[in-house]
Image (cartoon, coloured by chain):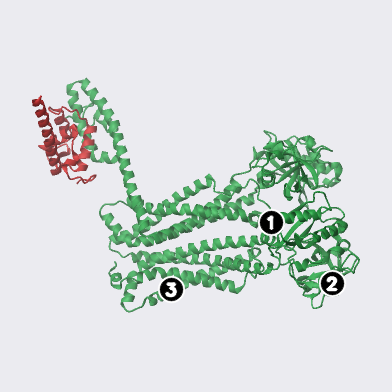
Amino acid sequence: MSGNSTLTGRRGWCGRWYGCGLRWYPAEHRRRFGEDMRNAFAAQVEDARGRGIGSLATLLVRTAAHLCWFGTAERVRQVRLRIGTTGTDLRLGFRRCLRDPGSSLGAAGVLALGFGVLATAFALLQGTVLRGLPFEEAEQLVHFERRGAERGGMPVVPHDLVEWRAAQTSFEGLAAFVEALAILGDQDPAAVRVERHEGVAIEPEAFGLLRVTAAHGRAFTAADASPGADPVLLLSDRVWRRSFGADPSIVGRQVIVNGRSTRVVGIMPASFGFPIDEAFWVPLRVDPSAVRRGEGRLDVFGRLRPGVSFDAARSEFDVIAANLAAAYAENRDITVDMKTFREEYIGEEFSSRMHMILLGAGLVLLIAVVNASHLLVARSEGRIREAAVQVALGASRGRMVVQTAGEVLTLSVLGGAAGLAVSMLALSGVRLAWPSLDFFDLPHGTAAPFWWSLQLDNVTMAMTTACVLATTVVASLLVSVRLFRLRDGAILSVSARGASRARSRGAQVVVALQLAMMTALVVPVLLAAASAASLERSVAPIANASVYSARISMPTDPATMVPLILERLQQQSTLADAVLTTAIPFERARSVALSTAATADQPRDDRPSVRIASVSPRFFSLFGVQPLSGRLFSTDDGAGAEPVLLINERAAARHFAGTNPVGQRVRLGDGSTWLTVVGVVPDLWMDGDRTDRQEGVYLPLHQSFATDPAWRSGRWGSVAVLGRARGGVRETEFAVQRAAAVVSPAPAVFDQSTMAERVDRHASRYRMYGHLLTALGAAALLLAVSGIYGVNRAMAMARAKEIGIQMALGASRYDVFRGVVRRSTGVLALGVVGGLAAAFWMAGGLAQMFFGLDVHAPWVFATAALAAVGSAVVAIVLPVRAVSRRNPVALLRLD
Amino acid sequence: MPTSTSKTDPFDYLPLKPAVLAILVAVSDAPRHGYAIIQAVREPPHGIHLDTGPLYRFLKRLLDDGLVKEVDQGDDEERRRYYTLTTLGARVLDAERARLLSLLSRASTRASAR
């Protein structure tokens, strides 16, 4: 064969062409046969050339087809082989998990915690920030406020809105809304429960600007807001379903809104609750002639015209505001503050807070991954010899990483699934708790914005899956790198102890940090438990499940009607011991300035205020309360009798310190009437759970129409009825309605619940804090204990020979334990002290989460320290115990 | 050394494909390199046109199954690889020959019966 021809030979163009074609074969095949194939092909070409150009052409065509076909076949075969090998390695890793279920479950649990925390944090971010606002082209919607040079942000006033509308060209339109309350019932009192709802009065053009239409019926038209129009109402999907059983025939029917017959014209879609989470909408007519310039309060928004930028609109409104400021004294120094809806309703601060939570959750996952890898390394140390043998037999590092990946993947998938379950639980907790979590900046008891959706959606699931895979890669590499080091040591017959000792300082830092974290989180858990117990004790007298409570909307002329209602209530038998009050215990009572003979001359603003409630005579006996001194009210304390009042313990201590208040006289607000204190009663929660605002006084209901300034100003929206229910809620409700029928043909009885439920609504906030903190504390405990255990198990394995020597020389297992714990004393002390310091700093900030407690109580910190040290000692001793149970002779034989 | 399978019973490999049988026969009498095998299987009675692609695919399988092995032929100037039959390969070839003979014998018996 000639190698010199330009056509034939290995270096001829045929040979080079064949060499190129061979590249389609897998590298392994080329390495093995490439050279030989080229030689054989060169010989074939030489042979074919001798037979003529036709033979050569046929050979080339046939060879090209073979190169394509067999190259592909080899590649497919190689991939299948690789998949088969990888599958075998992954299965091997899976079996390793089954061989050691204890540590597998431990590692999976730790990872579940990490995934659960991360999935929850991401779902929070996704559900509140990333989803954005559910409006068509939401970025075109702009919210307006007025801003004074000294007064800061202010609502828009009707006169300005009218001027803005006339002058602006940047917006398709502007629309206003104001908050509204509705006592909603049906024409037929038996058909629908009367309920109190929060909604808005809104200008009809708002729906066009928001690009929404009603799901049933219609939205408002301009005619609905014209003077003299019949009252109409739009219901939210939520109220339609809950109060009207999703009856479509409600559209067009009349319902009672605040005592007025109103026609329901439509039901809004389930996804609509503008602006926050409204239950209803009524038409708003902005009438500047009804108020003076500069008065009134409106929320205003607009939609930018297509092609108009936010900055251009802002410039236009700067000019409009300047013109108004020049024209009217009331607008002096007033500018217009414009924000996009996103800025107004989500806000950069909230968004960054959510991102910070996600970052924190990422750190928790990182800790979990490190701890899980410690556990895996610790349990793999026993297999170092096995790994060394595998290497000796030709196993590549890649295959060993794949085996480890199989192990980690099994644990990650288990942990991921459990983590999603943890996250679902946590999210349902957050959904329950968010009205009372200050974190969300919602007023207590307020529903979350309607666009929030705290659930595991597809994006969150996809993110969690990605994290599971990323964790598998990271943890596999972490574990593999450490195992390679140990294995290389084993191959070179070098003890793994050297490497372990080199690592021990880093491991001690891990132990100290995790112990500090655990200690810092045990403190709030203890505080939450103590808070719950304290709350339970405090509310026991009023948290009575047999006491019914409700509110009745108040008519005009309460001085005549309220005694009549009370009389009717006391005549019926469904509600025993019925009483009326202006303030239900545990809800916020109104406040009024109180002056004694000593402070009567002080300016009004300097006089301390107290909570005030007007109650009918048997109010205190309903809760089994006895006076601490003096007497309670009686039927003799009527309208014509001497004006009297009762004072609670805290108010007595503050205003009459060191003297007996009974018989002393006080004055309320700006009134000139002196009232005589006839008794001191225990504190009965007059301002929610605020322990610092419970000073209060009680007036006899019949006298209060003359002595309580609020009755005179007509500020009572409702009066509360309390009593012992002898029947079901429905029967009691009818009884109260019948009694209240004197004030209106369709009286509004609403906000019904037992006192136990009412107290529970307030107490649930603390319970929720308790659950959240306990969950966090348990998570920290699990993380810390697993981390400390993993580190110490690896160290115990490395010190196995040393332990064997100690035991061979006569040391008992307890001597060994004592030695190990003594060596860890410094780390334990450092971790616990650091954790206590962090907890001390945190407790001050968390004080509002706990009820009636000294958050820096020494017993709490001492108990937390003991619990942390106890858990840590167990996590340190357990791995040593496992090693010390082995035969000392076997331990001495270890390399 | 067999790498892909641990089959040691010659009958596990039967029946052989014509090309495989031809390759085994080609390397049974003396070690041959790739091109020599191509030439040998092209000769009668095989008459099989094997190109390098299919040849080396078969060879790879036979090497992995341990039916053929590489042998060193230090005197080859072009440093080509030579392949020869292993003991297992020889047993497989014998088994295939016996199978074919038995087949032929039955066919002959039937033909003479007709």
Report which residue position mark 1 lands on: A444
Q: Which chain is green?
A: A
Report which residue position mark 2 lands on: A677
Which quadrant holds the N terminus of chain A? top left
Quadrant for residue A187, please give it.
Answer: top right
Pick whichever, A617 or A686, lies toward us.
A617
Q: CA distance from mark 2 to mark 3?
A: 65 Å
Q: Position of residue A352 (x, y in %)?
A: 60, 51
**Mark 1–mark 2 CB contact (< 8 Å):** no
The chain holding disc 1 is A
- Viewer-side label of 2, 3: 2
Q: Looking at the image, tell me whether mark 3 or mark 1 is earlier in sequence order.
A: 1
Q: Amino acid at mark 1?
A: His
Q: Is residue A356 visible?
A: no
**Mark 2–mark 3 CB contact (< 8 Å):** no
Q: Which chain is red?
A: B
Report which residue position mark 3 lands on: A821
Looking at the rendered structure, the secondary structure element under dot 2 is strand
Question: Pointer 1: residues within 10 angstroms few (<14), some, or many (20+)?
Answer: some
Left or right, residue A753 beside residue B78? right
Q: Looking at the image, tell me whether mark 2 or mark 3 is earlier in sequence order.
A: 2
Pick whichever, A891 or A587, lies toward us.
A587
